[in-house]
Image: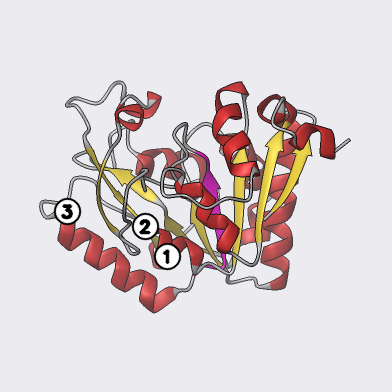
Amino acid sequence: MRFTVLPNGEALDREAAAFIWEAAEARPDLLICLASGGTPTGTYALLAQEPERLAHARFIQLDEWAGVAPEDPASCAHYLYRTVQDPLAVPPERWIGIRGDAPDAAAECRRVAAALEAAGPIDLCILGLGLNGHLALNEPAESFDPFCHVATLAEQSRSHPMVAAAAHPVRQGLTLGLGDILRARRILLMVSGAAKRTPLARLAAPRITPTLPASLMWLHGDAVCLCDREAAADTGLDDADP
């Protein structure tokens, strides 16, 4: 895994957008896995300014809150529609979404797994780093489900700002598994802000542990972590990159 420290969030957004555009130039119809949340929002805004550069790209949603409908502003689907799908005018045939309100969550996971099997593997997986070190909604645990599955959320995840306004408490999520993520040809992890300093410091040490799911990225052959200086402060990473 390679780490690059950027001066601030705007520089991180620009670097991540350039990384995505470069991947699309090499493979125009690449399959991009999209994370939700605050960290990639600026990057997605830059992508939306030049939609023609991803005119043939395909997309798959990384995860979703269980019980939350795609139309709900608290859903990952709604976030991705606003930031990526609508601005880039992505047609349904190039988009694999996850319905958090599916009546049978396990069946929905099987549907997504089958769609990924047909379209994949993922060419570029965009990820954020959870406060407890989770990737997607793969929480710290003794064992992991490698493929798309229903996950029980840790307490920190249940209090995520995205679901603060949800009509009902969110206790589970639908998520791609760590096996799906590690099968991706390339991984781009984005980390920003002082709140992520502790998990980033743990990740910077080349040690794989189930208490830090993100540490499994050390097993990947082409994983890049872009972080801003605020997140990298006191992690040792900020000393390595001028």
| Element assignment for label 3 | helix
User: Residue at point 47% right, 39% down?
Assistant: 133
Give the answer, above or below, for where 230 lies relative to 202: above
The answer to whether mark 1 and mark 3 are in CB contact below 8 A is no
Does 75 lie within the magenta span? no
Q: Is residue 120 left or right of residue 187?
A: left
| Residue 89 seen by the camera | no
Residue behind mark 2: 176
- Main secondary structure of the magenta stretch: strand
Residue behind mark 3: 105
Q: Quadrant of residue 20?
A: bottom right
| Element assignment for label 1 | helix
Tell me which amino acid carries mark 2: Leu
Residue behind mark 1: 180
Give the answer, above or below, for where 111 lies relative to 175: below
The answer to whether mark 2 and mark 1 are in CB contact below 8 A is yes
- What's the CA distance linking mark 1 and mark 3? 18 Å
Instruction: Please name whichever residue, 81 or 60, is drawn nearer the observer in this view of the structure.
Output: 60
| Residue 34 seen by the camera | yes
Q: Give the extent of the magenta segment.
A: 122-129
- The percent position of residue 239, horizontal first and vertical second, equals 83, 33
- The percent position of residue 21, horizontal first and vertical second, equals 70, 57
| Element assignment for label 2 | loop
